[in-house]
Image (cartoon, rainbow, N blue to C red):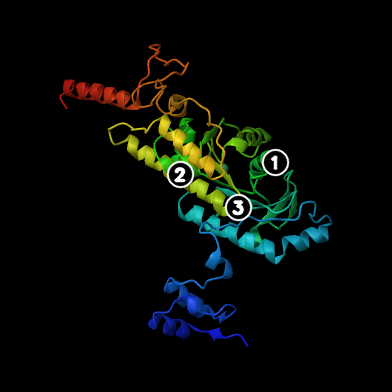
Amino acid sequence: MKKVYTAKDIEALAAKGQGACAIPEGAVLTPSARDALRALKLKKPTASAKSGPVVPDYEFKWTPGGDPKTPEAIEAYFNSPELRVLKERMCDIGRRIWTKNYCDGNGGNITIKVGDNLVLCTPTLISKGFIEPEDICMVDLNGNQVAGWRKRTSEVNTHLAIMKATPDAKSCVHAHPIHATAFAIAGVRPPTCLIPEPEVFLGEIALAHYETPGTPENAKAVGALAPEHQSIIMQNHGVICWGKDVEDAYWKMENTEAYCNTVYIASQLGHGLNPYGGDKLKELISIRRSLGMPDRREGWKECELCDNSEFRPGVVCVAPGGACDCEKEASDGAGSSVSTVDAEALVQKVTDLLMRQLGA
Ligand SMILES: [Zn+2]
């Protein structure tokens, strides 16, 4: 018979300095025991946790060509335990995007591909902080709802366009995080060559031109960028990220917002931005490649890699040292390379001069 652990048993283990490892595989934990484990920040290990990867791997795999076909079979699949796990995960991500202030009102939506032609999606007009597994819907790749009592989000077509454009995209998370959405409103792609990790794990953030949310035009604009970008800022709207699973897609959203937030704060410090240069970004892109993530910027010129002219109009090449063999000309007509540091210093000088003249 399986041993049942109560909260008292967990406390007794903790008192002996033993952790969750002392709980045998297959033991039954009462709800209060689970709470006690959580309170002690202990986790009952599973077989995969003992030997599995540090990065969670929630990629869902289905049998190609095996999608259920009849309404009854689709309904049974929709209510299966395996999809229930994914629905719970979607609710968890919903809570996380809401808690982190990435969405407000009924904003944001989440999808997971569960078949050749089947996708779980969040419903419309509901706060993502409070969705339950019973609220999740299922659609086909054309956006037709095939299961679920709530109406699917109208923005699902943009998710589906990403999934159709790249088979690697098995989950999408869309939200309106404040700093990344501020870049969306300004119509500015976040500058590059500033923080190494996002370059490796996120890659180049794309900017899709504005189209009305939920329209085929919006889906088309975003889908076209998806094969080469896992994070896409949609102009005047928000951000959509894709990954191999919902956790992966969500991490890309976190990476994007944290990056935009940090760049925004740095740009307010009055010292300009200090890029590390295209030669260093080349190194990061090769690390990215070694991790199995190709990058369209492989083979680009160093100064093209750090071309932040969208972030600072008039600034073309920002590679330290100013060496640049790009054919592009600076928009001020001088044709010379100007670093953002120089540009910022110039702005500061002019501001100081004006303030002195105004007697401030
Ligand atoms: Zn939206």
Whether 226 is drawn above or below 72: the answer is above
At x 32%, y 23%, the residue is 343
Question: Which label's residue is closer to the chain start, 2 or 1?
Answer: 1
Q: Position of residue 51 (x, y in %)?
A: 54, 65
Q: Are marks 2 and 1 in contact (CB under 8 Å)?
A: no
Q: Quadrant of ligand 1?
A: top right
Q: Mark 3 = which residue?
A: 245
Task: Name which residue type carries label 1.
Answer: Lys
Q: Residue furthest left?
A: 359
State left or right for residue 324 relative to residue 140. left
Mark toward the start of the polypeptide (3 vs 1): 1
- Residues 227 and 113: in front is 227
Residue 257, numbered circle = 2
- Given the image, on which type of amino acid does mark 3 rest? Asp
Q: Nearer the viewer, mark 3 or mark 2?
A: 3
Residue 78 visible in rendering: yes
Between residues 321 and 259, which one lies in front from this camera angle?
Answer: 321
CA gap, disc 2 and disc 1: 25 Å
Q: Pointer 3 and pointer 1: residues touching (CB < 8 Å)? A: no
Q: CA distance from mark 3 to mark 2?
A: 19 Å
**330 with respect to 154 (left or right):** left
Q: Amino acid at mark 2?
A: Glu
Q: The residue tagged with tag 3: helix, strand or loop?
A: loop
- The furthest residue to the right: 70
Say the numbered circle drawn on residue 19: none
Residue 164 has which mark? 1
Q: Is residue 171 above or below residue 324?
A: below
